[in-house]
Image (cartoon, grey):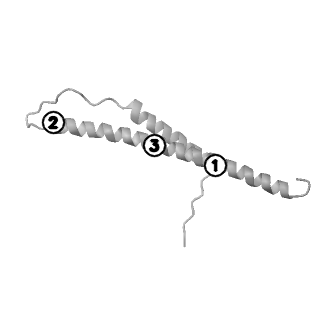
Amino acid sequence: MTGRITLSDDVLGDVVSALATASEAMTDGNGEPPRAELPSLTGIGDDVAAFLSGVEAAGLALADAGRGAGRAVADAMESSTALDRRIAESLSAGHPGG
């Protein structure tokens, strides 16, 4: 037995909007991590700075992936609409009086 997923254009449009919003929040809405040296009593300041740098890089990568996914969904919707239009045109052209 295979599963089936049916997504309406409204749902896909919401997905595109949500991905765009999330991407903007990741790049524009988040504060910058501290850039100063982080002194610590235990000597782990460099490790903390490296971790924060990694978190920032991961956030930017996630934002970029979100933008790419949003574009892919939007492109798929456009292709689907164009295909639907072509099918409808082909079917109406084959009927008398169409």
Residue for point 73% across, 49% down: 85
Question: In front: 13, or 71?
Answer: 71
Task: Choose the circle earlier in sequence order: 2 or 1.
Answer: 2
Q: CA distance from mark 2 to mark 1?
A: 49 Å
The image quarter containing residue 2 is bottom right
Disc 2 vs disc 1: Cβ atoms closer than 8 Å? Answer: no
Task: Choose the circle earlier in sequence order: 3 or 1.
Answer: 3
In the image, residue 87 sits, relative to residue 22, either above or below, namely below
Residue for point 29% across, 40% down: 55
Secondary structure found at label 2:
helix
Identity of the amino acid at label 1? Ser
Locate the N terminus and report the quarter of the image it occupies.
bottom right
Quickly name the residue at label 1: 79
Residue for point 17% across, 39% down: 47
Identity of the amino acid at label 3? Gly
Would you say residue 63 is visible in this rendering? yes
Q: CA distance from mark 2 to mark 3?
A: 30 Å
Would you say residue 11 is visible in this rendering? no
The image quarter containing residue 37 is top left
Which disc, if any, is residue 66?
Answer: 3
Quickly name the residue at label 2: 46
Mark 1, residues whose alpha carbon is within 10 Å: few (<14), some, or many (≥20)? few
Give how far across and how far down residue 11 sits, in percent.
Answer: 58, 48
Residue for point 25% across, 37% down: 52
Q: Nearer the viewer, mark 3 or mark 1?
A: 1
Instruction: Report the side of 69 relative to 7 (left or right).
Output: left
